[in-house]
Image (cartoon, helix red, strand yellow):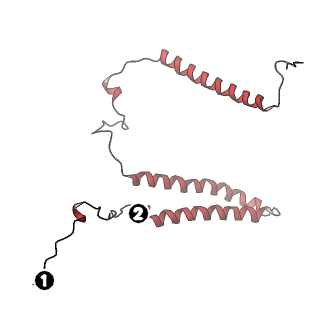
Amino acid sequence: MITTIPLGTVTTGLPANYATVFVFIVVGFAFAGLALGIAKLLRPSNPNPAKLTTYECGEMPVGSSWVRFNVRFYLVALFFIIFDVEVIFLYPWAVVFKQLYPVHGMGPIVFWEMIIFLAILTLGLAYVWVKGDLAWVKKLAQRPPQPGSQDAAPKEEVPAS
């Protein structure tokens, strides 16, 4: 006997959950595609050399846009983001901590959780410091001479007279 489920009923089975997610994904892609398609049809297209140049904060671009940046700029930005996130979590904790500390059993747990969080971040800072990534000016690494290169050729010994 085949049982049919009336339209509009909610099922709790696993396939029904996947079907709901699948419907949301399909509707999302359809909406995004429709919005981009309509925008392509309606927007004006009049390219000119001024519009096709690289935008540099209102300044005329000078030189090539394929300039190599030192990796230290990215490292400093990443370190800033990492330790800035620390402040984002630390500030709300400090605001609520005074209210949570008197609660029986909550105060010490909340305190030690933050101590562990800060210890992990301190270990990360120590690791970055030991690796030398906080030093803006670094020494160039000395590579050992490779076999077959000019530096690896044996030096002629001058006999002592």
How would you rate the neighbour count of disc 1 (Cα within 10 Å): few for under 14, some for 14-19, many for 20 or more? few
Upstream in sequence: badge 2 or badge 1: 2
Return the residue nearer the eye: 59 or 127.
Answer: 127
Vertical relation: 54 (above or below) 5: below
Which image quarter is the N terminus in? top right
The picture quadrant where one finds residue 97 is bottom right
> Tag on residue 160?
1
Q: Residue at x 75, y 63 (%)?
A: 109
Return the residue nearer the eye: 47 or 70.
Answer: 70
Q: Secondary structure at mark 1?
A: loop
Q: Residue at x 73, y 27 (%)?
A: 19
Return the residue nearer the eye: 77 or 55.
Answer: 77
Q: Which residue is mark 2?
A: 135
Q: Is residue 99 left or right of residue 56?
A: right
Q: Which residue is at the far left? A: 161
Distance between the alpha carbons at the discs numbered 2 and 1: 46 Å
Q: Position of residue 22 (x, y in %)?
A: 68, 27
Q: Is residue 30 left or right of residue 129?
A: right
Q: Position of residue 2 (x, y in %)?
A: 87, 18
Q: Which residue is at the far top? A: 41
Return the residue nearer the eye: 107 or 151.
Answer: 151
Q: Residue at x 36, y 37 (%)?
A: 56
The picture quadrant where one finds residue 131 is bottom left
Q: Secondary structure at mark 2?
A: loop
Q: Position of residue 127 (x, y in %)?
A: 51, 64
Q: Amino acid at mark 1?
A: Ala
Vertical relation: 149 (above or below) 41: below
Q: Position of residue 47 (x, y in %)?
A: 36, 21
Q: Amino acid at mark 2?
A: Ala
> Tag on residue 24?
none
